[in-house]
Amino acid sequence: MPSRSLRLIAVAAGLLVVTTGCSEIDEPAAAGLTRSDLMSDLAGQLAGSAGRTYEATYQLAGGGSATVSQAQEPARTMYVYPAGQALVTAETVTECRTRVRPVACSITVSAPAGVSGAPAVSGAPAASGAPAASAAAAQRAAQAQRVSSAEAAGLVTAGTVQLLLARAGLESDVQIAQHDTTIAGRHATCVELSGLEVTAAGVAQEATSAAVAGSAPRNAAAVGEYEACVTNEGVVGSFRGVVGDVEVDVAMTHYAERVSVGAFDLPAGAAVTDRRPGG
């Protein structure tokens, strides 16, 4: 039977090559590799993808599908999911209910860092998971937390996954297993997390100077199991776990480094209500 030291060396090597099985991450790990390093790296990749232009399609639990489109100049992200869509910019969040007629959309202000009334999850890490992320990247990830309708429909946002990974790297009781895979033709690093304690209403995003949370907790904290895969591009490849009250199970089926024509358009004939102060 291999010695413990040999097993630790094998774990470290497993992070550098494509593997087919899972490797349990011990701490302290060999060659300076720690659970925090792995989680921080993956969370940082997610934060860094804020500067990318791409379009990704996801298969949702129950057979539905969703699309995330992101572009720059100006920076904006569109989430399209069953029964709705949400357009997130640096200034506003526009959420639409697409199963009503006429389609109903509302515009709200994107919450700034430290906004009152947006409570952070107890124990959420400050400035963790994206140490090299720009303020713009952190802001985009934070704003994504506000798209509660998307997550209620079973589409997890990159900001949610980013915080969960950062949290996992700080919690010594969390068991972490890592493996590599290919999703929609893209290489991805996956981690399985067991014993991660989060509030049932979602998570808060705290990265660099930005800190914005989702809706107020509806339930007490719960310990759960999660699996998250992040592609080399820093995009969510797949995710499985409970977000809020929703059992989320998503997998990317298509990825392109361009967006479709009209990807950021609101539905034709939509009734738009401006809920911004003075709107």
Image (cartoon, rainbow, N blue to C red):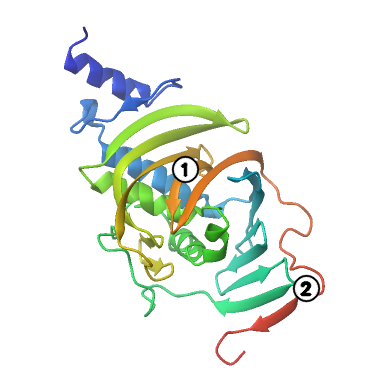
User: Residue placed farthest to the bottom in the image?
Assistant: 278
* Rendered view: 168 above or below 5: below
Q: Quadrant of the N terminus?
A: top left
Front one among 241 and 58: 241
Check disc 2 and give the amino acid type. Arg
Residue at 51% from the left image edge and 55% from the top image edge: 157
Residue at numbered disc 1: 240
**Kind of residue sitting beneath label 1:** Arg
Q: Which residue is drawn at the image coordinates 67% and 70% (left, top)? A: 96
Residue at 31 percent across and 54 percent down: it is 222
In the image: residue 229, left or right of residue 69? left
Q: x and y percent of residue 225 in the render?
A: 36, 42
As helix, strand or loop, the secondary structure at mark 1 comes to strand
Q: Residues within 10 Å of mark 2 (few under 14, many from 20)?
A: few
| Picture disc at residue 101 | 2
Query: From the viewer's perspective, is 150 left or right of 255?
Result: left
Image: 50 above or below 275: above
Res 36 visible: yes
Q: Nearer the viewer, residue 244 or 175?
A: 244
218 over 14 or under it: above or below: below
Residue 136, horizontal then vertical, whole percent: 48, 63
Quadrant for residue 41, please give it.
Answer: top left
